[in-house]
Image (spheres, helix red, strand yellow):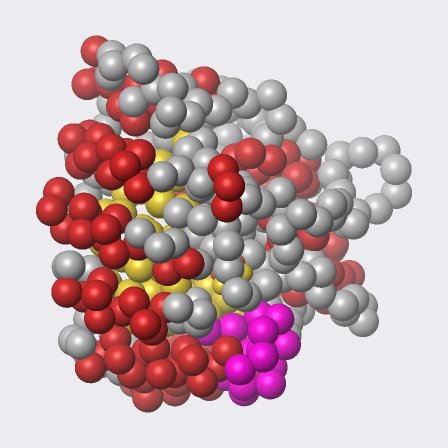
């Protein structure tokens, strides 16, 4: 394995590590950000390798580790891995569905020093939530899990991914967060990558619904000041400017897949011809500094117009490379979510059209499927949309 090179010292340190411990999950959300080709259990990194990766992350300056998946508690060694975070002084955040074996392992996770829990909720009404997540009886398990989290005194964040199947429940999500004792609620409009891209027509809300949801959140922020923090992620297709993908490509975050491939963001594998390095072959520091995937879109040198001369280029870093590829057919293009992109009007029209159509059935997330996106893009092709 190569050691960290001197180049790394000139770089800002990564702040966070997203550890996708497994792609196994009892739920099957149609907007899951995991790749369409999910890693199998047989290829997952072993405990010792994860512990080595965490040690290297701490040495690099990482502060937060997001123990994620799939469902991270599906791993038999989740307690050992969490304990390693605590011993290294890494703040650990368990990103969980709260179903399956999550509740049974929670006390042990608390005992070894888990710092925070982020629980996903697919809907407020149980039948709707369980339709979206594709698992019956999930809702009572989630509520029991949340109750134990707050009994233990662990800070709880609820994460609600918003789309046309639950956008009418935004008020309900806020009430639910208060009722469950959460300190923070994420009202995160769907980002159309991975499975959400496949299901875009089934998930796209209309602009009036989006605007209403934003008004509800803004009013609740005032009303619940000091009690509940509400984070709002607005949908790209209706936005004016894009978000800085992962805080800027290769600037803040590293994402390690279950098999040990290291990505600048969770969707980066959708970009063809990018070379990703594995923790089995390279140290994390070497990957951060020198991996072709990390250096490809780091900084601003790779940018084309209008990003290249835009005064926001070091604020949003040109938006999302994966979305640029998906919609414009070019990962180095300006993210078409940006109103300055020549393709932005088409993106907005596409959202309006899809939201007005009868939604197709969900394509649920599954391991071993051969799903191809059935969407009308890229937008720069000559063929009619
Ligand atoms: S989004 Fe749903 S299916 Fe994907 S990992 Fe989270 S809970 Fe599981
Ligand atoms: S042109 Fe590029 S840098 Fe400027 S706002 Fe749009 S995406 Fe951001």
Which region is colored magenta? 121-137
Does the segment drawn in magenta span residue 135?
Answer: yes
304, 39: nearer the viewer: 39
Q: Where is residue 65 in the image (x, y as percent from the top left)?
A: 27, 47
35, 192: nearer the viewer: 35
Q: Where is residue 258 in the image (x, y as percent from the top left)?
A: 44, 41
Q: Where is residue 334 in the image (x, y as percent from the top left)?
A: 57, 34
Q: Quadrant of residue 147?
A: bottom left
Q: Is residue 373 above or below residue 106?
A: above
Residue drawn at (36%, 68%) of the image? 102
Q: In this view, does 368 lie above or below 330?
A: below
Q: In this view, does 267 lie to the left or right of 20?
A: right
Q: Position of residue 314 (x, y in %)?
A: 36, 33
Which quadrant would the N terminus be assigned to in this image? Answer: top left
Residue drawn at (55%, 56%) of the image? 32
301, 186: nearer the viewer: 186
Does the segment drawn in magenta span residue 91?
Answer: no
Residue drawn at (32%, 78%) of the image? 146
60, 231: nearer the viewer: 60
Residue 277 visible at all: yes
């Amino acid at each position: 394995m190569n050691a960290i090179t001197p180049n790394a010292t000139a770089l800002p340190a990564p702040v966070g590590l997203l550890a996708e411990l497994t792609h196994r999950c009892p739920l099957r959300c149609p907007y899951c950000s995991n790749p369409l080709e999910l890693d199998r259990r047989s290829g997952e990194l072993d405990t010792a390798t994860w512990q080595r990766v965490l040690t290297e992350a701490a040495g690099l300056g990482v502060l937060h580790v997001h123990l994620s998946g799939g469902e991270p508690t599906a791993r038999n060694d989740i307690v050992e891995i969490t304990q390693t975070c605590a011993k290294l002084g890494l703040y650990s955040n368990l990103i969980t569905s709260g179903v399956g074996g999550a509740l049974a392992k929670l006390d042990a996770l608390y005992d070894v020093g888990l710092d925070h829990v982020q629980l996903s909720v697919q809907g407020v009404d149980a039948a709707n939530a369980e339709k979206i997540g594709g698992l019956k009886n999930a809702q009572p398990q989630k509520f029991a899990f949340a109750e134990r989290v707050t009994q233990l005194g662990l800070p709880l964040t609820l994460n609600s991914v918003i789309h046309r199947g639950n956008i009418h429940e935004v008020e309900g999500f806020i009430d639910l967060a208060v009722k469950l004792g959460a300190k923070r609620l994420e009202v995160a409009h769907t980002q159309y990558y991975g499975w959400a891209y496949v299901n875009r027509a089934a998930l796209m809300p209309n602009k009036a619904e989006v605007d209403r949801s934003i008004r509800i959140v803004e009013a609740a922020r005032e009303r619940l000041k000091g009690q509940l923090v509400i984070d709002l992620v607005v949908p790209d297709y209706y936005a004016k400017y894009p978000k800085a993908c992962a805080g800027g490509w290769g600037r803040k975050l590293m994402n390690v897949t279950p098999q040990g491939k290291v990505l600048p963001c969770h969707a980066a594998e959708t970009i063809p011809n990018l070379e990703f390095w594995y923790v089995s072959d390279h140290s994390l520091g070497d990957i951060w500094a020198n991996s072709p995937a990390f250096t490809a879109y780091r900084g601003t040198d790779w940018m084309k117009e209008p990003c290249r001369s835009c005064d926001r280029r070091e604020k949003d870093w040109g938006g999302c490379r994966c979305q640029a590829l998906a919609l414009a057919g070019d990962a180095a293009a300006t993210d078409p979510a940006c109103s300055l992109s020549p393709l932005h009007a088409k993106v907005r029209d596409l959202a309006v059209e899809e939201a007005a159509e009868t939604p197709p059935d969900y394509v649920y997330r599954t391991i071993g499927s051969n799903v191809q996106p059935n969407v009308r893009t890229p937008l720069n092709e000559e063929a009619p949309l």
